[in-house]
Image (cartoon, helix red, strand yellow):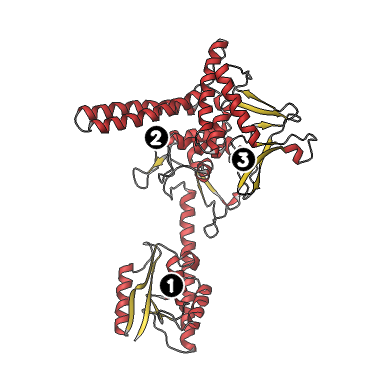
Protein backbone atom coordinates (compact mmCIF):
# COMPACT_ATOMS: atom_id res chain seq x y z
CA UNK A 1 0.00 0.00 0.00
CA UNK A 2 1.10 3.58 -0.73
CA UNK A 3 0.59 6.84 1.13
CA UNK A 4 -1.28 9.54 -0.74
CA UNK A 5 -2.33 13.19 -0.58
CA UNK A 6 -5.39 14.87 -2.05
CA UNK A 7 -5.33 18.25 -3.75
CA UNK A 8 -8.77 19.82 -4.15
CA UNK A 9 -9.32 23.20 -5.79
CA UNK A 10 -12.39 25.16 -6.87
CA UNK A 11 -11.73 28.49 -8.57
CA UNK A 12 -15.24 29.90 -8.99
CA UNK A 13 -18.84 28.76 -8.74
CA UNK A 14 -19.46 30.01 -12.30
CA UNK A 15 -17.26 27.38 -13.93
CA UNK A 16 -18.27 23.81 -14.66
CA UNK A 17 -16.52 22.27 -11.67
CA UNK A 18 -17.33 19.68 -9.06
CA UNK A 19 -17.81 20.96 -5.54
CA UNK A 20 -14.98 20.41 -3.02
CA UNK A 21 -17.04 17.75 -1.25
CA UNK A 22 -17.71 15.91 -4.53
CA UNK A 23 -14.03 16.03 -5.49
CA UNK A 24 -13.02 14.75 -2.06
CA UNK A 25 -15.50 11.87 -2.24
CA UNK A 26 -14.30 10.76 -5.70
CA UNK A 27 -10.63 10.99 -4.69
CA UNK A 28 -11.16 8.97 -1.49
CA UNK A 29 -13.12 6.33 -3.45
CA UNK A 30 -10.22 6.06 -5.90
CA UNK A 31 -7.71 5.82 -3.05
CA UNK A 32 -9.67 3.05 -1.35
CA UNK A 33 -10.05 1.10 -4.60
CA UNK A 34 -6.32 1.34 -5.31
CA UNK A 35 -5.07 0.67 -1.76
CA UNK A 36 -3.78 4.21 -1.16
CA UNK A 37 -3.76 5.44 2.43
CA UNK A 38 -4.77 9.11 2.81
CA UNK A 39 -4.39 10.82 6.18
CA UNK A 40 -6.62 13.78 6.99
CA UNK A 41 -3.55 16.02 7.45
CA UNK A 42 -2.59 15.44 3.81
CA UNK A 43 -5.87 16.66 2.30
CA UNK A 44 -5.17 20.09 0.81
CA UNK A 45 -8.21 22.14 -0.18
CA UNK A 46 -8.49 25.60 -1.74
CA UNK A 47 -11.66 27.48 -2.60
CA UNK A 48 -12.11 30.46 -4.89
CA UNK A 49 -8.49 30.43 -6.08
CA UNK A 50 -7.33 30.44 -9.69
CA UNK A 51 -4.89 27.80 -10.90
CA UNK A 52 -2.90 30.21 -13.09
CA UNK A 53 -0.28 31.10 -10.48
CA UNK A 54 1.07 28.48 -8.08
CA UNK A 55 2.57 31.08 -5.73
CA UNK A 56 -0.94 32.43 -5.09
CA UNK A 57 -2.10 29.05 -3.70
CA UNK A 58 -0.98 28.58 -0.07
CA UNK A 59 -2.30 25.03 0.30
CA UNK A 60 -0.56 23.99 -2.93
CA UNK A 61 2.73 25.47 -1.71
CA UNK A 62 2.37 23.69 1.64
CA UNK A 63 1.79 20.38 -0.18
CA UNK A 64 4.90 20.86 -2.36
CA UNK A 65 7.00 21.81 0.68
CA UNK A 66 5.96 18.61 2.48
CA UNK A 67 6.70 16.53 -0.61
CA UNK A 68 10.28 17.88 -0.59
CA UNK A 69 10.94 16.79 3.00
CA UNK A 70 12.82 13.57 3.74
CA UNK A 71 11.38 11.08 4.12
CA UNK A 72 8.53 12.12 1.82
CA UNK A 73 5.24 11.69 3.75
CA UNK A 74 3.30 10.60 0.63
CA UNK A 75 4.05 8.87 -2.69
CA UNK A 76 1.05 10.01 -4.73
CA UNK A 77 -0.96 13.21 -5.16
CA UNK A 78 -4.52 12.61 -6.34
CA UNK A 79 -6.50 15.28 -8.22
CA UNK A 80 -9.89 15.19 -9.85
CA UNK A 81 -8.48 16.64 -13.09
CA UNK A 82 -5.02 17.83 -14.11
CA UNK A 83 -6.53 21.32 -14.40
CA UNK A 84 -6.98 21.28 -10.58
CA UNK A 85 -3.21 20.86 -10.19
CA UNK A 86 -2.42 23.76 -12.55
CA UNK A 87 -3.83 25.70 -15.51
CA UNK A 88 -0.40 26.93 -16.51
CA UNK A 89 1.44 24.21 -18.46
CA UNK A 90 4.86 25.67 -17.77
CA UNK A 91 4.32 25.62 -13.99
CA UNK A 92 2.70 22.19 -14.23
CA UNK A 93 5.81 20.74 -15.87
CA UNK A 94 8.14 22.39 -13.34
CA UNK A 95 6.25 21.16 -10.27
CA UNK A 96 5.62 17.66 -11.65
CA UNK A 97 9.32 17.33 -12.47
CA UNK A 98 10.21 18.45 -8.96
CA UNK A 99 7.80 15.92 -7.47
CA UNK A 100 9.10 13.19 -9.77
CA UNK A 101 12.62 13.68 -8.35
CA UNK A 102 11.13 13.12 -4.88
CA UNK A 103 9.39 9.96 -6.07
CA UNK A 104 5.91 11.52 -5.96
CA UNK A 105 3.45 10.98 -8.84
CA UNK A 106 0.46 13.17 -9.74
CA UNK A 107 -2.60 11.20 -10.81
CA UNK A 108 -5.85 12.52 -12.27
CA UNK A 109 -8.65 10.12 -11.27
CA UNK A 110 -10.86 11.22 -14.20
CA UNK A 111 -8.13 11.39 -16.86
CA UNK A 112 -6.12 8.14 -16.69
CA UNK A 113 -3.03 8.03 -18.92
CA UNK A 114 -0.80 5.11 -19.82
CA UNK A 115 2.77 4.77 -18.59
CA UNK A 116 5.66 5.61 -20.88
CA UNK A 117 6.34 8.33 -23.48
CA UNK A 118 2.90 8.08 -25.09
CA UNK A 119 1.18 8.59 -21.73
CA UNK A 120 3.37 11.62 -21.05
CA UNK A 121 2.42 13.05 -24.45
CA UNK A 122 -1.29 12.60 -23.70
CA UNK A 123 -0.84 14.28 -20.32
CA UNK A 124 0.87 17.29 -21.97
CA UNK A 125 -1.96 17.57 -24.50
CA UNK A 126 -4.52 17.56 -21.68
CA UNK A 127 -2.57 20.31 -19.87
CA UNK A 128 -2.29 22.35 -23.07
CA UNK A 129 -6.08 22.08 -23.61
CA UNK A 130 -6.71 23.14 -19.99
CA UNK A 131 -4.48 26.20 -20.41
CA UNK A 132 -6.13 27.08 -23.72
CA UNK A 133 -9.56 26.81 -22.09
CA UNK A 134 -8.41 29.07 -19.25
CA UNK A 135 -7.08 31.70 -21.67
CA UNK A 136 -10.23 31.58 -23.79
CA UNK A 137 -12.48 31.79 -20.72
CA UNK A 138 -10.48 34.75 -19.41
CA UNK A 139 -10.83 36.51 -22.77
CA UNK A 140 -14.58 35.90 -22.90
CA UNK A 141 -15.03 37.20 -19.35
CA UNK A 142 -12.91 40.26 -20.17
CA UNK A 143 -14.94 40.99 -23.31
CA UNK A 144 -18.21 40.63 -21.42
CA UNK A 145 -17.07 42.89 -18.59
CA UNK A 146 -15.69 45.45 -21.04
CA UNK A 147 -18.99 45.59 -22.89
CA UNK A 148 -20.86 46.01 -19.61
CA UNK A 149 -18.47 48.76 -18.55
CA UNK A 150 -18.95 50.60 -21.84
CA UNK A 151 -22.69 50.59 -21.16
CA UNK A 152 -22.12 52.07 -17.68
CA UNK A 153 -22.91 48.83 -15.85
CA UNK A 154 -21.91 48.13 -12.23
CA UNK A 155 -19.49 45.21 -11.87
CA UNK A 156 -18.19 45.43 -8.31
CA UNK A 157 -19.38 46.03 -4.79
CA UNK A 158 -20.00 49.74 -4.17
CA UNK A 159 -17.34 51.62 -2.15
CA UNK A 160 -17.73 53.38 1.18
CA UNK A 161 -20.58 55.89 0.93
CA UNK A 162 -22.85 53.64 -1.13
CA UNK A 163 -24.79 50.42 -0.72
CA UNK A 164 -26.62 48.14 -3.12
CA UNK A 165 -30.27 47.98 -2.02
CA UNK A 166 -31.71 46.34 -5.14
CA UNK A 167 -29.65 43.81 -7.17
CA UNK A 168 -28.62 45.01 -10.67
CA UNK A 169 -29.78 48.55 -9.79
CA UNK A 170 -27.62 51.63 -9.18
CA UNK A 171 -26.24 51.85 -5.62
CA UNK A 172 -27.72 54.40 -3.25
CA UNK A 173 -25.99 56.86 -0.91
CA UNK A 174 -25.44 56.01 2.77
CA UNK A 175 -25.76 59.45 4.46
CA UNK A 176 -23.46 58.74 7.44
CA UNK A 177 -20.69 57.38 5.22
CA UNK A 178 -21.18 60.10 2.60
CA UNK A 179 -20.41 62.71 5.28
CA UNK A 180 -16.96 61.16 5.71
CA UNK A 181 -16.43 61.14 1.93
CA UNK A 182 -17.29 64.84 1.63
CA UNK A 183 -14.94 65.64 4.51
CA UNK A 184 -12.05 63.77 2.83
CA UNK A 185 -12.40 65.62 -0.48
CA UNK A 186 -12.97 69.01 1.16
CA UNK A 187 -10.04 68.62 3.57
CA UNK A 188 -7.67 67.62 0.77
CA UNK A 189 -8.79 70.11 -1.88
CA UNK A 190 -9.83 73.17 0.15
CA UNK A 191 -8.09 72.88 3.53
CA UNK A 192 -4.76 71.67 2.09
CA UNK A 193 -4.53 68.83 4.60
CA UNK A 194 -2.23 65.86 4.08
CA UNK A 195 -3.50 62.32 3.60
CA UNK A 196 -2.13 61.07 6.92
CA UNK A 197 -3.65 64.06 8.70
CA UNK A 198 -7.04 63.34 7.11
CA UNK A 199 -6.85 59.69 8.17
CA UNK A 200 -6.09 60.68 11.77
CA UNK A 201 -8.96 63.18 11.80
CA UNK A 202 -11.39 60.55 10.52
CA UNK A 203 -10.28 58.13 13.22
CA UNK A 204 -10.60 60.83 15.89
CA UNK A 205 -14.17 61.51 14.74
CA UNK A 206 -15.10 57.84 15.02
CA UNK A 207 -15.38 56.99 11.32
CA UNK A 208 -14.42 53.56 9.99
CA UNK A 209 -13.61 52.07 6.60
CA UNK A 210 -16.00 49.75 4.79
CA UNK A 211 -14.36 46.80 6.58
CA UNK A 212 -14.89 48.52 9.96
CA UNK A 213 -11.20 49.29 10.42
CA UNK A 214 -9.39 52.57 11.17
CA UNK A 215 -8.49 54.76 8.21
CA UNK A 216 -4.92 54.77 6.94
CA UNK A 217 -3.09 56.36 4.03
CA UNK A 218 -4.06 53.83 1.35
CA UNK A 219 -7.76 53.85 2.26
CA UNK A 220 -7.89 57.66 1.98
CA UNK A 221 -5.89 57.59 -1.29
CA UNK A 222 -8.30 55.04 -2.77
CA UNK A 223 -11.26 57.29 -1.98
CA UNK A 224 -9.57 60.41 -3.36
CA UNK A 225 -8.87 58.67 -6.68
CA UNK A 226 -12.25 56.96 -7.10
CA UNK A 227 -14.40 58.82 -9.70
CA UNK A 228 -17.54 57.00 -8.57
CA UNK A 229 -17.98 59.71 -5.94
CA UNK A 230 -18.56 62.34 -8.65
CA UNK A 231 -20.98 60.14 -10.63
CA UNK A 232 -18.54 58.31 -12.94
CA UNK A 233 -17.65 54.64 -13.32
CA UNK A 234 -14.07 53.51 -13.96
CA UNK A 235 -12.94 50.05 -15.04
CA UNK A 236 -9.80 48.36 -16.39
CA UNK A 237 -7.45 50.62 -14.43
CA UNK A 238 -5.27 47.84 -13.00
CA UNK A 239 -3.58 44.82 -14.53
CA UNK A 240 -4.99 41.77 -12.74
CA UNK A 241 -1.74 39.83 -12.96
CA UNK A 242 0.62 42.47 -11.52
CA UNK A 243 -1.86 44.95 -9.94
CA UNK A 244 0.05 47.72 -11.71
CA UNK A 245 -1.84 50.76 -13.01
CA UNK A 246 -2.38 50.66 -16.77
CA UNK A 247 -1.87 53.57 -19.11
CA UNK A 248 -4.75 56.02 -18.75
CA UNK A 249 -5.70 55.48 -22.41
CA UNK A 250 -6.78 51.91 -21.53
CA UNK A 251 -9.15 52.94 -18.74
CA UNK A 252 -12.89 52.77 -19.34
CA UNK A 253 -14.74 55.71 -17.78
CA UNK A 254 -18.47 56.20 -18.24
CA UNK A 255 -21.25 58.23 -16.65
CA UNK A 256 -23.06 56.15 -14.03
CA UNK A 257 -26.71 56.15 -13.07
CA UNK A 258 -26.00 56.57 -9.34
CA UNK A 259 -26.20 59.85 -7.44
CA UNK A 260 -22.90 61.69 -6.98
CA UNK A 261 -21.64 62.56 -3.48
CA UNK A 262 -19.31 65.34 -4.66
CA UNK A 263 -19.09 67.53 -7.77
CA UNK A 264 -16.85 66.77 -10.73
CA UNK A 265 -15.12 70.12 -10.19
CA UNK A 266 -14.12 69.11 -6.66
CA UNK A 267 -12.96 65.69 -7.87
CA UNK A 268 -10.82 67.27 -10.62
CA UNK A 269 -9.35 69.73 -8.13
CA UNK A 270 -8.29 66.81 -5.94
CA UNK A 271 -6.72 64.96 -8.89
CA UNK A 272 -4.76 68.06 -9.87
CA UNK A 273 -3.22 68.35 -6.42
CA UNK A 274 -2.61 64.62 -6.15
CA UNK A 275 -0.73 64.51 -9.48
CA UNK A 276 1.46 67.51 -8.70
CA UNK A 277 2.61 66.36 -5.27
CA UNK A 278 5.98 64.64 -5.37
CA UNK A 279 5.88 61.12 -3.94
CA UNK A 280 9.14 59.21 -4.44
CA UNK A 281 8.51 55.50 -4.21
CA UNK A 282 9.29 54.17 -0.76
CA UNK A 283 9.90 57.66 0.67
CA UNK A 284 8.48 58.59 4.03
CA UNK A 285 5.39 60.84 3.71
CA UNK A 286 5.70 64.44 4.87
CA UNK A 287 2.83 63.89 7.30
CA UNK A 288 4.92 61.53 9.44
CA UNK A 289 7.42 63.12 11.76
CA UNK A 290 10.49 62.01 13.65
CA UNK A 291 9.88 64.59 16.36
CA UNK A 292 6.87 66.57 17.63
CA UNK A 293 8.63 69.84 16.76
CA UNK A 294 9.19 68.83 13.12
CA UNK A 295 8.01 71.36 10.55
CA UNK A 296 7.80 74.19 13.07
CA UNK A 297 11.41 75.10 13.84
CA UNK A 298 12.73 77.69 11.35
CA UNK A 299 16.25 78.87 10.66
CA UNK A 300 16.82 82.40 12.11
CA UNK A 301 19.18 83.23 9.24
CA UNK A 302 17.35 82.14 6.08
CA UNK A 303 13.87 81.19 7.34
CA UNK A 304 13.99 77.64 5.97
CA UNK A 305 12.65 74.71 7.95
CA UNK A 306 15.09 73.04 10.31
CA UNK A 307 14.78 69.29 9.89
CA UNK A 308 15.07 66.72 12.68
CA UNK A 309 17.93 64.25 12.43
CA UNK A 310 18.41 61.22 14.64
CA UNK A 311 21.77 60.23 16.09
CA UNK A 312 22.29 57.00 18.00
CA UNK A 313 24.19 57.50 21.23
CA UNK A 314 25.00 54.41 23.30
CA UNK A 315 21.61 52.83 24.02
CA UNK A 316 19.36 55.74 23.06
CA UNK A 317 18.52 57.96 20.07
CA UNK A 318 19.09 61.71 20.25
CA UNK A 319 17.60 64.32 17.91
CA UNK A 320 18.98 67.61 16.71
CA UNK A 321 17.58 70.18 14.29
CA UNK A 322 19.61 71.56 11.40
CA UNK A 323 18.72 74.04 8.66
CA UNK A 324 17.61 72.36 5.45
CA UNK A 325 19.35 75.10 3.47
CA UNK A 326 22.62 74.57 5.34
CA UNK A 327 22.49 70.84 4.58
CA UNK A 328 22.07 71.69 0.88
CA UNK A 329 24.77 74.41 0.87
CA UNK A 330 22.21 77.22 0.48
CA UNK A 331 22.61 78.74 3.95
CA UNK A 332 25.94 79.68 5.51
CA UNK A 333 24.76 80.05 9.11
CA UNK A 334 25.40 77.24 11.58
CA UNK A 335 22.15 77.15 13.51
CA UNK A 336 21.84 73.51 14.54
CA UNK A 337 20.37 72.86 17.97
CA UNK A 338 19.74 69.73 20.03
CA UNK A 339 16.16 68.68 20.69
CA UNK A 340 17.06 68.31 24.37
CA UNK A 341 17.60 72.09 24.44
CA UNK A 342 14.50 72.98 22.37
CA UNK A 343 11.95 70.78 24.09
CA UNK A 344 12.11 72.30 27.60
CA UNK A 345 12.45 75.81 26.14
CA UNK A 346 9.27 75.40 24.07
CA UNK A 347 7.33 73.90 26.99
CA UNK A 348 8.48 76.68 29.32
CA UNK A 349 7.55 79.34 26.75
CA UNK A 350 4.02 77.94 26.35
CA UNK A 351 3.58 77.60 30.12
CA UNK A 352 4.71 81.18 30.74
CA UNK A 353 2.41 82.38 27.94
CA UNK A 354 -0.81 81.07 29.46
CA UNK A 355 0.23 81.78 33.05
CA UNK A 356 1.50 85.34 32.61
CA UNK A 357 -0.13 86.37 29.29
CA UNK A 358 3.38 87.20 28.05
CA UNK A 359 2.89 86.42 24.38
CA UNK A 360 2.26 88.05 21.03
CA UNK A 361 0.73 86.43 17.98
CA UNK A 362 0.43 86.99 14.25
CA UNK A 363 -2.79 88.01 12.54
CA UNK A 364 -2.63 85.03 10.18
CA UNK A 365 -5.47 82.56 10.50
CA UNK A 366 -4.28 78.97 10.47
CA UNK A 367 -5.35 76.88 7.44
CA UNK A 368 -6.87 74.48 9.95
CA UNK A 369 -9.06 77.34 11.21
CA UNK A 370 -9.99 78.94 7.89
CA UNK A 371 -13.73 79.35 8.56
CA UNK A 372 -16.16 78.70 11.38
CA UNK A 373 -18.49 76.68 9.18
CA UNK A 374 -15.82 74.22 8.01
CA UNK A 375 -16.86 70.63 7.42
CA UNK A 376 -14.75 69.37 10.29
CA UNK A 377 -16.29 71.78 12.78
CA UNK A 378 -19.78 70.80 11.67
CA UNK A 379 -18.89 67.16 12.07
CA UNK A 380 -17.49 67.67 15.55
CA UNK A 381 -20.63 69.59 16.50
CA UNK A 382 -22.77 66.72 15.18
CA UNK A 383 -20.76 64.20 17.20
CA UNK A 384 -21.24 66.29 20.35
CA UNK A 385 -25.01 66.40 19.70
CA UNK A 386 -25.04 62.63 19.21
CA UNK A 387 -23.41 62.18 22.62
CA UNK A 388 -26.17 64.30 24.14
CA UNK A 389 -28.73 61.89 22.66
CA UNK A 390 -26.75 58.94 24.01
CA UNK A 391 -26.72 60.53 27.46
CA UNK A 392 -30.51 60.85 27.33
CA UNK A 393 -30.87 57.20 26.26
CA UNK A 394 -28.60 56.13 29.12
CA UNK A 395 -30.80 58.04 31.59
CA UNK A 396 -33.93 56.48 30.09
CA UNK A 397 -32.42 53.01 30.35
CA UNK A 398 -31.71 53.57 34.04
CA UNK A 399 -35.13 55.08 34.77
CA UNK A 400 -36.87 52.18 33.03
CA UNK A 401 -34.92 49.60 34.99
CA UNK A 402 -32.94 48.31 32.04
CA UNK A 403 -29.52 49.39 33.43
CA UNK A 404 -28.32 49.30 37.02
CA UNK A 405 -27.06 52.44 38.78
CA UNK A 406 -23.46 51.18 38.31
CA UNK A 407 -23.99 50.70 34.56
CA UNK A 408 -25.55 54.15 34.28
CA UNK A 409 -22.65 55.80 36.13
CA UNK A 410 -20.11 53.99 33.96
CA UNK A 411 -21.87 55.05 30.73
CA UNK A 412 -22.27 58.62 32.00
CA UNK A 413 -18.55 59.00 32.79
CA UNK A 414 -17.55 57.51 29.44
CA UNK A 415 -19.87 59.82 27.48
CA UNK A 416 -18.81 62.90 29.44
CA UNK A 417 -15.12 62.15 28.80
CA UNK A 418 -15.80 61.71 25.09
CA UNK A 419 -17.85 64.92 24.97
CA UNK A 420 -15.10 66.88 26.72
CA UNK A 421 -12.49 65.58 24.29
CA UNK A 422 -14.58 66.62 21.28
CA UNK A 423 -15.35 70.04 22.75
CA UNK A 424 -11.64 70.67 23.35
CA UNK A 425 -10.86 69.68 19.78
CA UNK A 426 -13.62 71.94 18.47
CA UNK A 427 -12.31 74.84 20.55
CA UNK A 428 -8.84 74.41 19.07
CA UNK A 429 -10.21 74.46 15.53
CA UNK A 430 -12.44 77.50 15.95
CA UNK A 431 -10.81 80.78 14.80
CA UNK A 432 -10.76 83.71 17.17
CA UNK A 433 -13.09 86.43 15.99
CA UNK A 434 -11.19 89.55 15.04
CA UNK A 435 -13.79 91.89 16.57
CA UNK A 436 -13.07 90.66 20.10
CA UNK A 437 -11.25 92.85 22.56
CA UNK A 438 -7.55 92.20 23.29
CA UNK A 439 -8.50 90.90 26.73
CA UNK A 440 -11.03 88.43 25.30
CA UNK A 441 -8.53 87.22 22.69
CA UNK A 442 -5.88 86.67 25.34
CA UNK A 443 -8.30 84.68 27.48
CA UNK A 444 -9.11 82.39 24.57
CA UNK A 445 -5.42 82.03 23.70
CA UNK A 446 -4.63 81.17 27.31
CA UNK A 447 -7.21 78.37 27.28
CA UNK A 448 -5.87 77.01 23.99
CA UNK A 449 -2.25 77.10 25.09
CA UNK A 450 -3.06 75.34 28.37
CA UNK A 451 -4.81 72.58 26.37
CA UNK A 452 -1.83 72.25 24.02
CA UNK A 453 0.57 72.19 26.97
CA UNK A 454 -1.35 69.31 28.54
CA UNK A 455 -1.19 67.32 25.30
CA UNK A 456 2.58 67.88 24.98
CA UNK A 457 3.11 66.57 28.54
CA UNK A 458 0.84 63.55 27.96
CA UNK A 459 1.66 60.13 26.50
CA UNK A 460 0.18 61.11 23.13
CA UNK A 461 2.13 59.98 20.06
CA UNK A 462 4.41 62.25 18.01
CA UNK A 463 1.79 62.90 15.31
CA UNK A 464 -0.85 63.92 17.87
CA UNK A 465 1.52 66.32 19.66
CA UNK A 466 2.72 67.80 16.38
CA UNK A 467 -0.75 68.41 14.94
CA UNK A 468 -1.98 69.89 18.24
CA UNK A 469 0.98 72.28 18.47
CA UNK A 470 0.48 73.36 14.85
CA UNK A 471 -3.04 74.48 15.69
CA UNK A 472 -1.67 77.38 17.72
CA UNK A 473 1.98 77.84 16.74
CA UNK A 474 2.96 79.26 13.35
CA UNK A 475 6.74 78.85 13.77
CA UNK A 476 9.52 78.49 16.34
CA UNK A 477 12.84 80.31 16.02
CA UNK A 478 15.89 79.50 18.12
CA UNK A 479 18.57 82.20 18.32
CA UNK A 480 21.87 80.48 18.96
CA UNK A 481 23.72 83.71 19.73
CA UNK A 482 21.38 84.67 22.57
CA UNK A 483 20.31 81.09 23.43
CA UNK A 484 16.63 82.06 23.31
CA UNK A 485 13.52 80.50 21.77
CA UNK A 486 10.66 82.54 20.35
CA UNK A 487 7.22 81.12 19.46
CA UNK A 488 4.87 82.82 16.99
CA UNK A 489 1.22 82.03 17.68
CA UNK A 490 -1.77 81.90 15.36
CA UNK A 491 -4.75 84.02 16.29
Label ID, residue 387:
none
User: Horizontal and vertical percent for residue 378?
Assistant: 45, 26
Which residue corresponds to mark 2?
Answer: 176
| Mark sitting earlier along the chain (2/3) | 2
Quadrant where the C terminus lies? top right
Which residue corresponds to mark 1?
Answer: 63
Which residue corresponds to mark 3?
Answer: 286
Q: Is residue 219 above or below residue 241?
A: above
Label 1, residues with CA under 10 Å away: few <14, some 14-19, many ≥20: some
Q: Are marks 1 and 2 in contact (CB under 8 Å)?
A: no
| Mark sitting earlier along the chain (1/2) | 1
The answer to which quarter of the image holds residue 6 is bottom left
View extreme (bottom): residue: 116
SS category of the residue bearing label 3? loop
Quadrant where the N terminus lies? bottom left
View extreme (left): residue: 401
Label 2, residues with CA under 10 Å away: few <14, some 14-19, many ≥20: few
Mark 1–mark 2 distance (CA, rounded to whole Å): 47 Å
Amino acid sequence: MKNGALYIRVSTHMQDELSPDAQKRLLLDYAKANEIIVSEEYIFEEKGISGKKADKRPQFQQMIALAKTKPTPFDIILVWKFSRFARNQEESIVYKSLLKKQGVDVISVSEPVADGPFGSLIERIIEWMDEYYSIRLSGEVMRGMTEKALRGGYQASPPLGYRMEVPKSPPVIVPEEAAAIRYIFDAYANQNKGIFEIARSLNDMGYETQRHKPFERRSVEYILQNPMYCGLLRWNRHCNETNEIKDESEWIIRKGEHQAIISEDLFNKVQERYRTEYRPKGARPSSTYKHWLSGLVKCPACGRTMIAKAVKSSDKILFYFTCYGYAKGKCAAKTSVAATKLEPAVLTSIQEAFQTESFSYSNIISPRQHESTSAEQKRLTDLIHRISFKEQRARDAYMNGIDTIEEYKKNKIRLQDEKQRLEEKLALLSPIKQDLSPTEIRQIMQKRLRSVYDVLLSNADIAKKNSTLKNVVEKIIYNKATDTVKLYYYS
